[in-house]
Amino acid sequence: MEDLDVKSKINDILSLSKSTPVIQRCISALERTQTIETSRDILGNTKEMLYTYRLSVEMHRSVIEGGDDLVNALEKEPGEKVRLNWFKTDKEEFFIFTDPELKRLIGCISYL
């Protein structure tokens, strides 16, 4: 999938989701394309993503904005796979979890 197509789909999913401060900042960052330094698109096993996220939180011993909602969503996620899209601005990193087809937001977290 082409980067602009992925970016557009992510922006659409975020815009249709429950508005939270982290989602609003993510939308703003996506709209300012010049601020995006790196992006990645990973398709992975839902349970492995949840385990990796929990391990990361434990190792860093920090609270991650949007993290509790993400854990709850991943625990309830019926699909075997989730897609993780990541990008970084000069101030913040965003991790957007969606279904594999980029049609439904599972969660959005941010590291400042």
Image: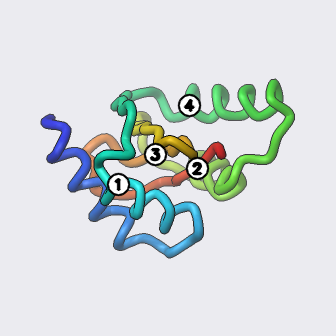
In the image, what residue type sits under mark 1?
Answer: Leu
Which quadrant of the structure image shows residue 111? top right
Residue bearing mark 1: 30
Q: Nearer the viewer, mark 4 or mark 1?
A: 1
x and y percent of residue 21 in the render?
A: 59, 69
Which quadrant of the structure image shows residue 103? bottom left
Q: Nearer the viewer, mark 4 or mark 2?
A: 2
Disc ID at residue 109: 2
In the image, what residue type sits under mark 4?
Answer: Met
How far apart marks 4 and 3 lie (CA) works out to 10 Å
Relative height, residue 48 to residue 75 (above, below): above
Left or right: 21 as drawn, with respect to 79 = right
Asked if disc 2 and disc 3 are in contact, CB closer than 8 Å, the reply is: yes
x and y percent of residue 107 in the render?
A: 52, 54
Asked if disc 4 and disc 3 are in contact, CB closer than 8 Å, the reply is: yes
Secondary structure of the residue carrying numbered label 3: strand
User: Which residue is painted at 48% across and 68% down in the image?
Assistant: 24
How far apart marks 3 and 1 lie (CA) works out to 15 Å
How far apart marks 4 and 2 lie (CA) works out to 13 Å
Left or right: 4 as drawn, with respect to 14 = left
How far apart marks 4 and 1 lie (CA) works out to 23 Å
How far apart marks 2 and 3 lie (CA) works out to 9 Å
